[in-house]
Image: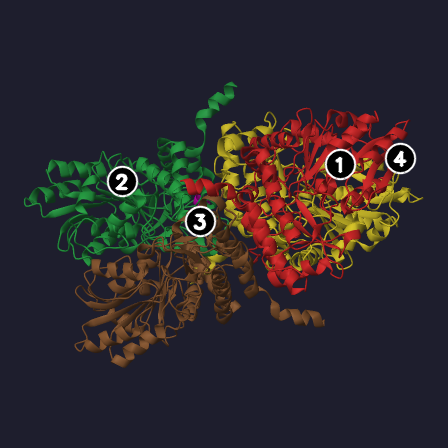
Chain colours: A green, B brown, C yellow, D red
């Protein structure tokens, strides 16, 4: 099958480094043997470091982030339990929907799309919950639909300020391994991500960090689960195995990915994402447009939803990029359908790749009659990416 | 990472043909675009043909067979519902356990390991269930733990004889695409398998065939589910997509695998499995041993549990094969731990590969003091595999 | 090993499509069996079509273009024979050097670098050669060092005008399969290329097209050769084999590459190269610079040598691109070292990839103090690449 | 393309370990940059160690062993020079033929096929050459056509005994990296091998070890050469590059292969080949047949030519293995065509793989009416491969 040679700019799955693809593409080996245990252990340890936890544990399911969400609630809660969640994008919406389907009572804080987790409203809701009916607070760290990063430390601050004992579940699907995450410091009880974003692997692993509090909760949780049962997984993983057939190649890939990330240094990884995202935002400004995220503190470093001018449909940019230039961007979802197009800029990505994406976005917008100047966004991003700090040094050589 | 160059003889995941591995190892593409839809459709159609259904539909989850079991019950049943199941091996046991964890009332027919689905007992139980409290009958087509193939047509016959309206769920994880399966003819409502057995792909897909009756049941089923929800999947797949991130490479691989199997011809595929299995059984007989399956009609064509002589521990054969000869066989599980070792012979396998497996099994048994003659089992299998029918023709040339 | 995720812009080896890499990466098979013959034949046939020959034959050596040059002369000439060649770049120079090392008498027409094959001078030299001492005329179709395309039809015209019976050897290493080539129409006796340029494969195949006249010449040629002997190769290839171990994977890759090129249509392939090259030249003009090739008719569609302003060293651009932006361009070689940097734009390349290359070139030049405006070249190329012809249609939808 | 899943038993190219295939399958990188230099250097150093030289150098050509032969003579000799060579198989014959085509005077010692280099005759010829007209002695270390290993140390001994100053060229194509080789100790001036045998890579590299004496000879050698010129290669490799486009992937693969071999330990590598070959020879004896090599000291550890009984044609075994069992063996070549079939047992190979090859050979012979017992050869090889020495230890555990 012929595949495009162009990078993708969807907000995940990301472009995959070739050596990670090779690591994930393995001949069959016996998953009950020591070779598998030998790759599972460093994968789990590496993810712990990336999640920022020493107290917690890591559990892997052969699933996706949605499976991680389901694992988080089904392992810790019982039918009828109340959880608190804000809705400000498609992915926070879907998690709420999942909870409702599982018979949970979701106390929803409706929040305008483009904003982040509403700290004050969360604190108020928790403060008002004198009886501590709220068993868990759910937060979407990085709302992929709107390109909004929420302040997770502040959510924890609100919980502490309210003196509320609820558990804290964080969807870090499109943030973890690309943006700073501090599970222990933030008091996160379940952190969720997948293999196909910051870890730059194919989709197929739901990655969960769980705190001792979550472990304790699983003993009393009454929601049914088997495939996603933390108990079976903890028992099996302790022995270097899985309770059922594991996706061996992905786990080997994960062991290599975490080694790569830690070798690069997490600060460098995060700085790289910030630099590339800054270039994208510079391009958007040069086009006379803005991110959908309302304020700079909300700007995500992994995905940007670009607000299109009135009279234009952002989906057309995406459609045209695919049909004419063989390049993938993300459409607006749900409430922002048509109002934005999305540029994913996470995982494996170089400045040069990003510039090719911005170039194509410009061509599409020009084709569609957007009032933008070809090359303008590229130039703005180049100014960010250019190694200007070396120029003087060069001159002095 | 260095991997063994030897084939594996675990009862799945199987050895993978190189071209399927290459098909599954893809660069990232936009899973919301037409390229993905273009590979999903033939994958679904091909699986339908292999399942033997025209009335039914196929649904894929990024999970494993265990997830398929969970999907089967959670989409069609409600807490407190009764299901009927026989327990005669580790995998039938685990499915029963899953049902119980999900709040179902499992009417269990305890059956000796080494036997198959107890047709008469099933018919009796159904006949006795005048009030039709039994909502579903669960059957394990091929019990991987004991190498026992059950007569699914006969189970259907028992249901019909009892005039019972229960749904019929069949675990075909280690049979489908390797042994004949006739979903429509057998009146199966949910058939379950995975990508890593007869389809010869990496683990990571739960593959479900569902009948119109199962589709109807999902409207009233009250067990909670989101990740494994048939409804979301049906809606999305109708549009060529997924409700969440799909494992694109595996689905592409599946589209190629089904094309391969159908090009070879299913009768040829099944005959190939029978021929290889017959050679394995000839070897076992030459060793003076027997399969754990009690009678020839129960012999599985995809896995054989070899009953070891008194005084020996089958697990030692497996351990020794791994440590000394870098080859993987399966240990006995649960009730048959130590009493057997298992030889997987499904999926991608040539006669030559099988002979290498039998050769190593012989060396291990000889090392451990088994009263077997080196080469004896190989010779018996060679007699089966040899193209003896050509010899006279050769002489006449 | 981690490799760059950025495309390369060296003038070969080119970027390789993933499916061609997979085609070339094969498990070992018996090169004396029918499977090998089954891939060799379509590879040879496909190359014939691409060379534009029905009268000629194709021969493959496990070598590179340099080996092809050596094969051309050693199979057709004898020590002391005279050949006529123009020198106007590093690669025409090297071929002359090869001839001299092989004891040939090379009548050299020194031609300024940046110009192409000097038609009038060639005609004059041939006309003056009344005794027909010149046995072969050598021409470099596309001088990779300067980005100059010569008019091969005109060289043939000069030969015909002079009524000279010399053989005609053409180096098409960086033109064939990317730019039009008409072996029969141009009366080419040996055409030479490699696997790693227009065929988009790894280096390792010298590809030679030979005319009946060249075949006849090999009977009397006295230069020694064994590895590069046309006679052994013709004999073996007629039977679907090789006289020694062939590079099986590359030949399989070639069979797929030619199928791809012919499916795309050679006119489309050439138009694609012209379009991408036109964008590059538009960028250079926007930078206020020029190609090293002196006139537009000489502009190569596969590589452009960019003349750098006085006071700058083109090699610095290349060095900086590699060290700072992880991207490969080509340095100036020989006489033009420092005076140019080279942008390869052949083989597998999309508009988006090319724009990333131009973006990085701009950043490097800006870093080094070149008087260019960031984004200017990109914008000029975008104007070429943009699907402007669709805009009106879009408006009308 | 579907490829066989069975191993090959041709005497090269060998089966390739997957991680070496992945190492050789690389995206394009700039071969003029430091990344290439960084893989070339360890490849060259590793090969030196494997050749057993500290005085010598290593040179790599993008070619095959035949190219290595040509490089050896064309870089060190002049037209009309005399070389001494014994002919006792197809590959020693071909090298002689190559020398003759290059205008050398080959003093040939005709030796029965099945024997090795005739030490006494070589010493006699050298002793008789009072005028030292013989410039080089050529020896085929491992004659792949007959499965005969020659005593290279003894050839050197003969040269020393004769006090003859000739250079010493050794074809180690099917021995180096699989059987002990001591370039310095044996006073070898040019040692030749390829990538596709002991190094377990695809074909495409001629690997030459050259002594200081060979380096000195290249200054005066008058045979023409360019592609295979040691001088260009030495100059370029000193700077981490190539004089023309290198096969980057193969060189990266070589860097990994040498690291693997040295990590395993050369003594272990050689012992592994001896063990596997001993099993093959035990099988042949059990079949009532013999190797073509006349005495045990001549038995090659990388390939065995099996002498077939009168009235049988060895080629039929090979043809039948391919057509009926999808497995590749080697036919007899030249003088031994039909008299033998050949089993390659070099490079990447496990005991289990070898047993599959012996099993298939048995089935083919049985099909063809050979008087052999199925399983007999396998049993004999199993006795060799079995870890019998562990059995008592096991009992004591």
Residue C188 coordinates in the image, percent (x, y): 78, 51
- Residue marked by disc 3: A29
User: What whole-number distance in Å separates the C-alpha atoms at marks 4 and 3?
Assistant: 59 Å
Q: In this view, does D190 lie above or below D146?
A: above
- Judge whether residue B202 is colored magenta: no
Crowding around mark 4 (Cα neighbors within 10 Å: few <14, some 14 to 19, many 20+) is few
Upstream in the sequence, badge 2 or badge 3? 3
**Quarter that holds the C terminus of chain C:** bottom left
Assess whether mark 3 and mark 2 are in contact (beta carbons under 8 angstroms). Answer: no
Foreground of the two, B69 or A323? B69
Q: Name, please, the residue furthest toward the top.
A: A396
Assess whether mark 1 and mark 2 are in contact (beta carbons under 8 angstroms). Answer: no
Foreground of the two, C218 or D18? D18
- Residue marked by disc 4: D80
Task: Kindly identify which numbered label has been placed on residue D71.
Answer: 1
Element under label 3? loop
């Amino acid at each position: 099958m012929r595949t495009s040679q162009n990078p993708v700019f969807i907000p995940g799955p990301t472009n995959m480094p070739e050596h990670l693809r090779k690591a994930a593409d393995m001949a069959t080996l016996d998953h009950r043997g020591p070779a598998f245990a030998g790759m599972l252990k460093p994968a789990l340890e590496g993810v712990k470091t990336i999640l920022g936890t020493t107290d917690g544990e890591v559990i892997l399911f052969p699933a996706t982030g949605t499976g991680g969400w389901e694992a988080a609630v089904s392992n810790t809660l019982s039918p009828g339990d109340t959880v608190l969640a804000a809705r400000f994008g498609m992915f926070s919406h879907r998690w709420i929907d999942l909870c409702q389907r599982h018979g949970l009572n979701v106390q929803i804080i409706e929040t305008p799309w483009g904003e982040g987790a509403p700290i004050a409203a969360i604190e108020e809701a928790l403060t008002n919950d004198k009886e501590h009916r709220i068993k868990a607070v759910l937060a979407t760290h990085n709302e992929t639909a709107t390109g909004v990063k929420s302040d997770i430390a502040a959510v924890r601050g609100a919980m502490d300020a309210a003196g509320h004992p609820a558990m804290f579940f964080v969807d870090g699907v499109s943030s973890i391994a690309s943006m700073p995450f501090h599970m222990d410091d933030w008091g996160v009880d379940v952190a969720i991500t997948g293999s196909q974003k910051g870890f730059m692997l194919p989709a197929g692993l739901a990655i969960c960090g769980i705190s001792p509090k979550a472990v304790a909760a699983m003993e009393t949780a009454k929601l049914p689960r088997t495939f996603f049962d933390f108990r079976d997984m903890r028992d099996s993983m302790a022995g270097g195995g899985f309770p059922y057939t594991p996706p061996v190649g992905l786990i080997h890939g994960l062991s290599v990915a975490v080694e790569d990330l830690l070798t690069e240094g997490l600060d460098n990884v995060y700085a790289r994402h910030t630099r590339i995202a800054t270039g994208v935002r510079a391009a958007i400004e040069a086009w006379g447009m803005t991110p959908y995220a309302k304020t700079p503190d909300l700007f995500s470093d992994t995905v940007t939803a670009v607000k299109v001018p009135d009279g234009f449909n952002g989906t057309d940019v995406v459609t045209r990029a695919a049909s004419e230039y063989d390049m993938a961007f993300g459409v607006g979802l749900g409430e922002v359908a048509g109002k934005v197009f999305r540029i994913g800029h996470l995982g494996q990505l170089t400045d040069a790749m990003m510039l090719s994406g911005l170039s194509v976005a410009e061509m599409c917008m020009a084709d569609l009659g957007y009032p933008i100047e070809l090359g303008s966004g590229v130039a703005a991003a180049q100014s960010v990416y250019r190694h200007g700090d070396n120029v003087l040094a060069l001159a002095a050589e």
